[in-house]
Image (cartoon, grey):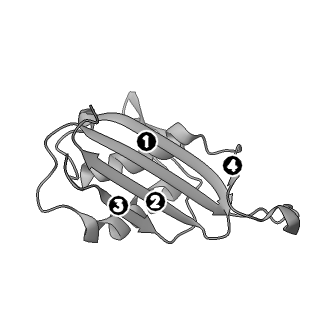
């Protein structure tokens, strides 16, 4: 088992995900394309994660843990603002994971995203907005 890579990005997580695509016509064919907002999210992820890019891509099985924390809602009573509160509103956890996983693949954290055999995603409201990413090579057998 290798030492995990843990990255904490002190940002408000984006709400635009790969689900935010548009249909564009190219001649007689239509294809999905990223919206301006999604391109900005991907660009931000690439910039923020580039310093953490491993020297070589991981080659074995990979587990991925993601935690997204948004600032408490303004409607949240102050008495409830203790610790983390599960976020049960959009964006969906799988769409958040897909966008970030695609960027990690593009930055060559691993050779192929098919290597990710296990993943967990948490969405929270909390005091300190952030995204925490943990990449672990090797299986937990």
Nearest to the eye among marks 3 and 4: give it.
3
How far is disc 4 from disc 1 in space, using C-alphas? 18 Å
Residue highlighted by disc 3: 6
How far is disc 1 from disc 3 in space, using C-alphas? 18 Å
Residue count near mark 4 (Cα–Cα under 10 Å), binned few <14, some 14–19, many ≥20:
some
**Which residue corresponds to the image point at 37% horizontal and 64% vertical from the top-left?**
7
Nearest to the eye among marks 4 and 1: give it.
4
Going from N to C along the chain, the mark reached first, 1 or 2, is: 1
Going from N to C along the chain, the mark reached first, 3 or 4, is: 3
| CB under 8 Å between discs 1 and 3 | no
**Which residue corresponds to the image point at 61% horizontal and 70% vertical from the top-left?**
128
Label 4: which secondary element? loop
Going from N to C along the chain, the mark reached first, 1 or 3, is: 3
| CB under 8 Å between discs 1 and 2 | no
Residue highlighted by disc 4: 87
Residue highlighted by disc 2: 132
Label 3: which secondary element? strand
Nearest to the eye among marks 1 and 2: give it.
2
How far is disc 3 from disc 2 in space, using C-alphas? 7 Å
| CB under 8 Å between discs 3 and 2 | yes
Count of number-bearing discs: 4
Residue highlighted by disc 1: 98
């Amino acid at each position: 088992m290798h030492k995990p890579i843990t990255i904490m990005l002190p940002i408000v997580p984006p709400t635009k995900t790969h689900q935010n695509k548009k249909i564009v016509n190219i001649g007689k064919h239509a294809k999905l394309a990223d919206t301006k907002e999604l391109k900005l999210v991907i660009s931000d992820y690439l910039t923020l994660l580039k310093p953490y890019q491993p020297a070589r891509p991981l080659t074995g099985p990979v587990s991925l843990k993601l935690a997204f924390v948004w600032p408490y809602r303004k409607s949240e009573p102050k008495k409830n603002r203790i610790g983390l509160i599960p976020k049960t509103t959009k964006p969906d956890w799988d769409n958040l994971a897909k966008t970030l996983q695609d960027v990690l693949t593009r930055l060559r954290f691993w050779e192929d995203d098919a290597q990710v055999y296990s993943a967990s995603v948490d969405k929270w409201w909390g005091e300190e907005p952030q995204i925490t990413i943990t990449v672990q090579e090797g299986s937990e057998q």
